[in-house]
Amino acid sequence: MVGLWPVSLREDLRKALVEEGLRKVDRWTERHGISHVEFEDVLIGGKAIDPFFNANKPHDLDEVEELLVLNEKSGG
């Protein structure tokens, strides 16, 4: 899951977290209306990759480097 919000909502988000102690993001987004968007995987070198691939650990970075090489080889 990825959330994209306008910067103009930052003060309301801060207030919800700090002053209201809100911890459920769903409750905050309900205030502002949300849209759900599905993103299809991206093909890199014939391999289906999540367009929001999350690299948090060293082995994730290794995979990103491999994907970059595959992308270059496939002319991407």
Image (cartoon, rainbow, N blue to C red):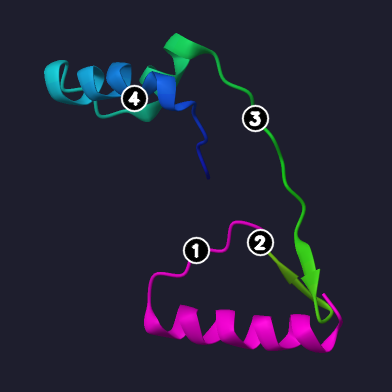
Residue at the (81%, 82%) spot, across then down: 45
- Quadrant in the rendering for residue 43: bottom right
Residue 64 or residue 11, whichever sits in front:
11
* Residue type at the position of mark 1: Asn
Q: In what element is the residue under mark 1?
A: loop
To which residue does mark 2 refer? Answer: 50
Residue at the (69%, 88%) spot, across then down: 69
Q: Are marks 2 and 3 in contact (CB under 8 Å)?
A: no
Q: Give whichever of discs 1 and 3 has the lower sequence position.
A: 3
What is the distance, in whole Å, between disc 1 and disc 3 at their CAs?
19 Å
Q: Is residue 15 left or right of residue 46?
A: left
* Residue type at the position of mark 2: Asp
To which residue does mark 3 refer? Answer: 36
Q: Is residue 8 left or right of residue 52?
A: left
Residue at the (86%, 81%) spot, across then down: 75
Q: Are marks 2 and 1 in contact (CB under 8 Å)?
A: yes
Q: In what element is the residue under mark 3?
A: loop
* Residue type at the position of mark 4: Arg
The stretch of residues the image draws in magenta is 50-76
Q: Is residue 31 left or right of residue 43?
A: left
Q: Is residue 38 left or right of residue 27?
A: right
Label annotation for residue 54? 1
What is the distance, in whole Å, between disc 2 and disc 1 at their CAs?
9 Å
Q: Give whichever of discs 1 and 4 has the lower sequence position.
A: 4
